[in-house]
Image: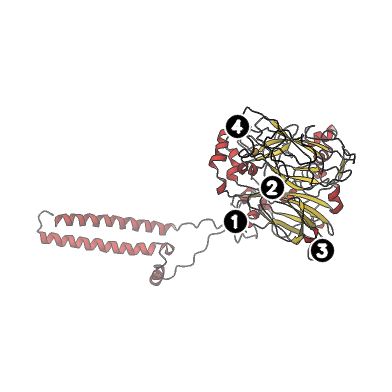
Amino acid sequence: MVAGLRPSAQTAKMRSHYVLTLLVLVVLLGAAFLLVPPAWLPSQLRPYYYSLFGESAYEEPPASKKIDLGQAEPFCPDEHPEWRKRQVIDGVTVEESLACNPDNPWAVAAFVKGTNNVSMDTLMKAGLAPDAVVIEDDRDGDGDPDVIRIKLEVVELNGHSPDVPEPVPAFFIGPGIQPGFWVFAPKTSGMATKNFESLEANELLRVPSPVIRVEQGDMVQITLENTHYFPHTIHFHGVDHPYSHHESQGNDGVPETSELPVMPGESRTYEFSQFDGPGFHTGHGEVMPGKSRMFEMTPRQPGTFFYHCHVQPQAHIHMGLQGMFIVEENRPNNWVQTLNIGAGHVRHPSIAVHEKYAREYDLHFQEVDSRLNDIIKTTNDPRLIEKAMNRQYNISKRQANYFLLNGRLFPYTFRESLIVVEPDEKVKLRVLCGGEEGLSLHPHGHKVTITHYDGVEHNPLAQITRDVVWLSMAQRVDLELSTVNDGLHSSGEGVWLLHDHKERAFTTDGIHPGGSATAIVYRSYLNDNGWPKTQGVDWAPFFTPQYYRREVPVWATYDETGMLGDPGSRAPRVSRAVLLGFVVGVLLGSLVVLVRSLIKWIRGV
Ligand SMILES: [Cu+2]
């Protein structure tokens, strides 16, 4: 109660107080309504706002922000121009490769003749150990060797290093992109990196695991030397093998149904040579770190097959322990290229392939979910890697984000895995779908004929010619690419894209263009350094990490003005913002005064 005043006078004073405060509140609310940007108002209120105050005036949009792409990589680094030409090394003909980054021809020669049969000079230039691929013994006297002994190791790429912050040895699948991998690799000599200064893996240590190529009827021994910290096996997929071997031990490699795994500290020798007669004898069993294991087989049927690790396959296959396994038809004097490491171009094709085809390419498609593969970049403790990989990562929630062709993403695929052709010829493509999502292979400008499924010839009278070839998971097809310009097989010369028509596979983690895309390129459309004469946009942005880090607007570099560039953020209008802040402040203050007066009044009554 206000002292000295009668109740009626006091009430009148209070009432005028409220009225005044309310009036101020209404005025302030109006001012706030006026100052609030119309875009903030609910859409129902906006017409009312415009009817009272008119349409908002045109405001100039902010200027496009300048995009700094930095230095783009050279499209074709052209490091080894001499590797490209046709040459004869230690008596082995290595065919010309027109790609920008061809495979090492000395390694090709050593894989054809055997690391035991080439000169020390060739071995040094190849970077291979003398026992990497031992080839000997012409058992049937047909002019080519019939005993092939291959040693494979397990190599980690882009793994965690206790010494340097970068993942090592480095293997880039695209600009600035290096997920972790494990691959089967031949026994090399010297360093894992290119040289002392470089962290980059040498050319023989790369994705994918090498193509293994032998002749029908060869006695093939493959020794897996487990140089890794986890157990592994090799499963030779697509070939008949007995469930048990001669000692009734399991032979199917599945710990749950076939055999006990080899535990740490234990070892087991698998013997497959006791089989009588021909047969593709294959062995399984986990090979523990530091142990080795031999697989022996005599393949009866030619075809395009598959090999992969069968230990925790949901992780190990996708880490990169998968490759193509090819059995060539038996012919006299048939020296085949035992390993094909790199771009896929077979630079010493078999006699049977040469009978029908001008050239041959091995195309290995696979995918990466970097949430799995990058686990090995986080720690060196195998227990933590095992837990993260097999107990925390859940493959049923897998979502692949990198789609690879022969271990690379676009545009790197154009440096290595171009399919170079000339008019009026036939080219053989062997294709493996090593991923989880299938492959919808589409060549532009061409229709290809499927000659083989999973290594088995399709009835020649019923072979299908089409422009989309679907491969299921783990499936292989052999394709005949004809460059006869008849409007069916080919539409003529050019740079014709060849890509997976699952659109996400044409991106790199969702950024287009990327993924496993490459091209069928006619020789007349190829520059001297192996880069195709493309038409259209500048590729410089695709050779920067920024583009794939999502920092470059799609069409920012298409025109001089950057018409569709980055708009940046609109500068706030300072005066309006300050005024709005002031009004809202006073409004809140008045509300407090009003509420306090009301409380007082209620207590007074
Ligand atoms: Cu494994």
546 w.r.t. 20: above or below: above
Q: Is residue 66 left or right of residue 598?
A: right
Check whether the beta carbons of the residues at disc 3 and disc 2 lie within 8 A of each other.
Answer: no
Residue situated in front as seen by the camera: 342 or 222: 222
Say few, some or many: other residues with alpha carbon within 10 Å of mark 1 (under 14 / 14 to 19 / 20 or more): some
Q: Which residue is mark 4?
A: 162
Determine whether the residue tagged by mark 3 lies in a helix, strand or loop: loop
Q: Quadrant of residue 466?
A: bottom right
**Disc on the earlier residue, 3 or 1:** 3
What count of labels does the image hold?
4
The residue positioned farthest toward the bottom in the image shown: 51
Kindly report which numbered mark, 3 or 1, lies closer to the viewer in this rendering: 3
Image spot of residue 577 (x, y percent): 41, 57
Residue situated in front as seen by the camera: 213 or 534: 213
Determine whether the residue tagged by mark 4 lies in a helix, strand or loop: loop
**Disc on the earlier residue, 4 or 2:** 4
Q: CA distance from mark 3 to mark 2?
A: 30 Å
Kindly report which numbered mark, 2 or 1, lies closer to the viewer in this rendering: 2
The residue positioned farthest toward the top in the image shown: 265
Kindly report which numbered mark, 3 or 2, lies closer to the viewer in this rendering: 3
Residue situated in front as seen by the camera: 475 or 443: 475
Q: Which residue is mark 2?
A: 408
Q: CA distance from mark 4 to mark 3?
A: 57 Å
Kindly report which numbered mark, 1 or 4, lies closer to the viewer in this rendering: 4
**Disc on the earlier residue, 1 or 4:** 4
Q: Which residue is mark 1?
A: 553
Q: Where does ligand 1 appear, by image quarter?
A: top right
Image spot of residue 292 (x, y percent): 70, 31
Q: Which residue is mark 3?
A: 485
Say few, some or many: other residues with alpha carbon within 10 Å of mark 3 (under 14 / 14 to 19 / 20 or more): some
- Tag of residue 300: none
Say few, some or many: other residues with alpha carbon within 10 Å of mark 2 (under 14 / 14 to 19 / 20 or more): many
